[in-house]
Amino acid sequence: MNTTRFCLVRHGETDWNVARRLQGHTDIALNIHGLAQAQQLAQSLKQAHLEFDVLYTSDLKRAADTANAIVEYLKTPAITNRELRERHLGALQGLTLDEAPIVKPDLWRAHLARELDHEMSGGESIAQFSQRIRGALEALRLKHLGKCILLVSHGGALDMMYRIATNQALDAQRVAVVPNASLNWISHDGEAWRLDRWADIGHLEKLALDNLDL
């Protein structure tokens, strides 16, 4: 069998992560801590002598800048892929977790209830998001059969990849943590997805924040 391995990386920390503000497709840069996390992550990959056949990244700046740190250490070019973006959260984008229930109570209730077809007033439904992420993973798997793929993306996207690998229902409450700059491994043996290792942050000097954009 041709087993294809994916090392999934969540981007480093942003100021919006610290403020508990929903980012979605908003293009926020890494903060100073996030840049340091990206460097620590890249150094750990180099020191572990891990070899990757290809590196893909979301085109949003927080992911692309994390990938660029990896490029600097591993000398592996990064290929941008818009399909690896975070879920578009529509009218919830830009609101903090405290503001959202007050400013958009109906949307917030639908968000918490994980209503699969709700598009969050101009955003992307969970069903649409799942289809996009599943399609992106499958396209990369078929393009690089039997290879090891390094992929830099976002917390909500990685949560969706976790659900795909573990067959977790889309409307089930989240069980996986997705810290900033974490390493997460899934694989496909030609027949099914498998979860190999999750939420590795041993390479970081300080604690990393969990994901908000689900």
Image (spheres, grey):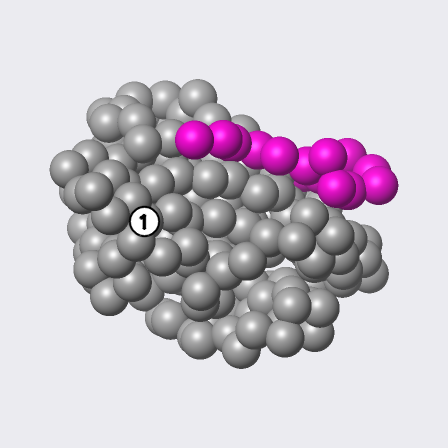
Q: Which residue is mark 1?
A: 4
Q: Is residue 95 magenta?
A: no
Magenta span of residues: 196-210
Q: Is residue 76 visible?
A: yes
Packing grade of label 1 (10 A; few <14, some 14-19, many >=20) is many
Q: Which quadrant would the N terminus be assigned to in this image?
A: top left
Q: Position of residue 167 (x, y in %)?
A: 24, 27
Q: Position of residue 204 (x, y in %)?
A: 77, 42
Q: Residue at x 48, y 48 (%)?
A: 7
Q: Position of residue 107 (x, y in %)?
A: 34, 40
Q: Which quadrant would the C terminus be assigned to in this image?
A: top left
Q: Amino acid at mark 1?
A: Thr
Q: Is residue 156 visible?
A: no
Question: Quadrant location of residue 140?
Answer: bottom left
Q: Residue at x 53, y 77 (%)?
A: 77
Q: Residue at x 44, y 22 (%)?
A: 175
Q: Residue at x 70, y 57 (%)?
A: 46
Q: Is residue 191 left or right of residue 70?
A: left
Q: Position of residue 6 (x, y in %)?
A: 41, 49
Question: Between residues 54 and 154, which one lies in front from this camera angle?
Answer: 54
Q: Is residue 163 left or right of residue 200?
A: left
49 versus 115 height, above or below = below
94 versus 209 height, above or below = below
Q: Give the mark count.
A: 1
**How would you classify the magenta stretch by its main secondary structure?**
loop
Question: Quadrant location of residue 147?
Answer: bottom left
Question: Quadrant location of residue 149?
Answer: bottom left
Question: Between residues 198 and 16, which one lies in front from this camera angle?
Answer: 198
